[in-house]
Image (cartoon, helix red, strand yellow):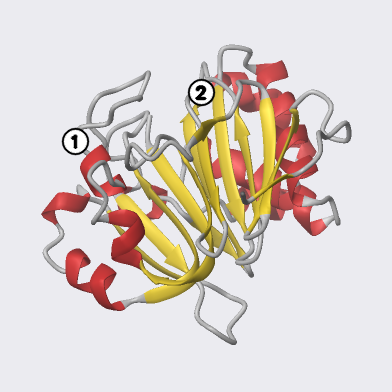
Amino acid sequence: MCRHLAYVGPESPLARLLTEPPHSLFRQSWAPRRQRYGTVNADGFGVGWYAPGDPEPARYRRAGPIWADLSFTDLARVVRSGAVLAAVRDATLAGADAEAAAAPFAAGRWLFSHNGAVAGWPDAAAPLVPTLPPVDLLSLPARTDSAFVWALVLHRLRTGTDPARALAETVREVAGAAPASRLNLLLTDGATIAATAWGDSLWYRAEPGLGTVVASEPYDDDPLWREVPDRTVLTADSTGVLLAPAARPAAASPKEPCT
């Protein structure tokens, strides 16, 4: 159910991350190699990126498959950024809310994506509704499980919770209400990346001078890629990666530097 990718590091063309690698996110839209659920990610796509001097990201999203957008390859070739979040979508409910349902979701400096599904949606999520302010529910960008999960994360961020803890707490909360859910979440503010591996694949690649990539699956066969264990929360920046159990986000292992 979707493939996604985030990058922080030196400024780079979007194409170097999204279209040029042999197993890029572009190719993963029709031929993913490690996707456990679903086979084709053709229900929309999106990319968000940060421009120098502007803390709020720009987004380009469409309701159709990425390969059908004749403008995207040109955009990816010329747009450069030091922080990117992109996703291709396999919808839980095909066609639901069209472009509005395509990640990344955005608020202020944040970009967010969800790879997975809330089991039993929407009934299973009903007990979580009282945890959100009414205005947040009325402001959901789409009527999807991913938009609801984003609202839960964003509410925590707005109350001062740090990104990794906000993701871990949200995952535990949703999984408690709907235990069979798959909740690989991806979040960036343009300088750092936070992510969870919960029910689907997640990998990272940290390289000195070339930044850090966190992705549903590797976009090439470079041995630098490392798989993230399931039930893990990841925090990364351009210098390295830190992994911790999602059940205990404060008990983090030492950061693995770019080596």
Mark 2 and mark 1 in contact? Answer it, CB < 8 Å: no
Identify the amino acid type marked 1.
Trp
Disc 1 packing (10 Å; few <14; some 14–19; many ≥20): some
Asked whether 168 or 14 is in front, the reply is: 14
Vertical comparison of 24 with 80: above or below = above
Identify which residue is drawn at 64% across, 63% down.
189
**Foreground: disc 2 or disc 1:** 1
- Which of the marked residues, 2 or 1, is nearer the chain's N terminus? 1
Q: Secondary structure at mark 2?
A: loop
* In-image side of 17 versus 216 (left or right): left
Say which quadrant the N terminus sits in: top left
Where does label 2 land, which residue? 121
Residue 26 placement (x, y as % from top left): 24, 48
Location of residue 77 (image quadrant) = bottom left
Where does label 1 land, which residue? 30
Vertical comparison of 134 with 89: above or below = below
